[in-house]
Amino acid sequence: MPKALICENDPEVQKNLAMTFKTLNIESIIPLSLEEALNTLETEDIAIAIVNETFANEKPQKNKIIQWIINLPMYRRREIMLVITGENLKSLDRLLAFAKGANLVLNNKDLNNFYQFFKRAYLEYQSTYRQYKELLAK
């Protein structure tokens, strides 16, 4: 079962995202701190990371979780779908996602529609990297 790391500040958002992932048969891990999130990334096989830019009082441009993920070796980075959320982000902005090293960016206001956004982006992510992952498996 794939695992999703949910790094959101709002407990209600955490709960809603975890319920969404449960319907998709994805296990949710909700860290309580920056240190716990980084430890989880190091010790667990995370397939999806949802990271609010300001999780654990981080600055958007210097979020340690996002930096840790985007600085992974390419073979490992491609195994994690990174979704960045924030109050100043434009949802579904592909250029912004590319610039931030993410697969998807969402404004906090659009998290109520997370399932619709995520489902489409996840299917695209899977089809894009399917061949890449198959080649690595050989």
Image: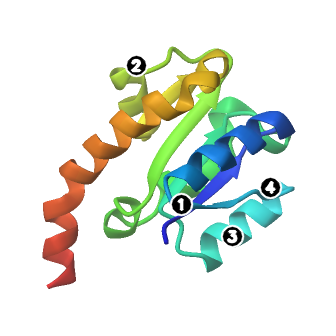
Q: Is residue 91 above or below residue 10?
A: above
Q: Left or right: where does residue 82 sit relative to residue 41?
A: left
Viewer can see residue 10: no
Q: Left or right: where does residue 121 sit relative to residue 109?
A: left
Closer to the chain start, of discs 4 and 2, is 4
In the rendered image, residue 111, in percent from the top left (x then y), is placed at 62, 26
What residue appears at the point 44 percent right and 40 percent down from the top-left corner?
102
As helix, strand or loop, the secondary structure at mark 3 comes to: helix
The residue labelled by disc 3 is 40
Residue 93's label in the rendered image is 2
Task: Please name which of the two marks, 2 or 1, marks the residue nearer to the observer.
Answer: 1
Task: Please name which of the two marks, 1 or 4, marks the residue nearer to the observer.
Answer: 1
Task: Please name which of the two marks, 4 or 3, marks the residue nearer to the observer.
Answer: 3
Q: Amino acid at mark 3?
A: Thr
What whole-number distance in Å separates the C-alpha atoms at marks 3 and 1?
Answer: 16 Å
In the rendered image, residue 133, in percent from the top left (x then y), is placed at 22, 69
In the rendered image, residue 49, in percent from the top left (x then y), is placed at 56, 52
As helix, strand or loop, the secondary structure at mark 4 comes to: helix
Residue 134's label in the rendered image is none
- Residue 114 picture quarter: top right
Question: Does the CB distance between marks 1 and 4 fall below 8 Å?
Answer: no
As helix, strand or loop, the secondary structure at mark 2 comes to: loop
What whole-number distance in Å separates the C-alpha atoms at marks 1 and 4?
Answer: 22 Å
Q: Is residue 35 above or below residue 12?
A: below
What whole-number distance in Å separates the C-alpha atoms at marks 2 and 1?
Answer: 25 Å
What whole-number distance in Å separates the C-alpha atoms at marks 4 and 2?
Answer: 26 Å
Asked whether 136 or 69 is in front, the reply is 136
Q: Amino acid at mark 2?
A: Asp
What whole-number distance in Å separates the C-alpha atoms at marks 4 and 3?
Answer: 10 Å
The residue labelled by disc 4 is 34
Closer to the chain start, of discs 1 and 4, is 1
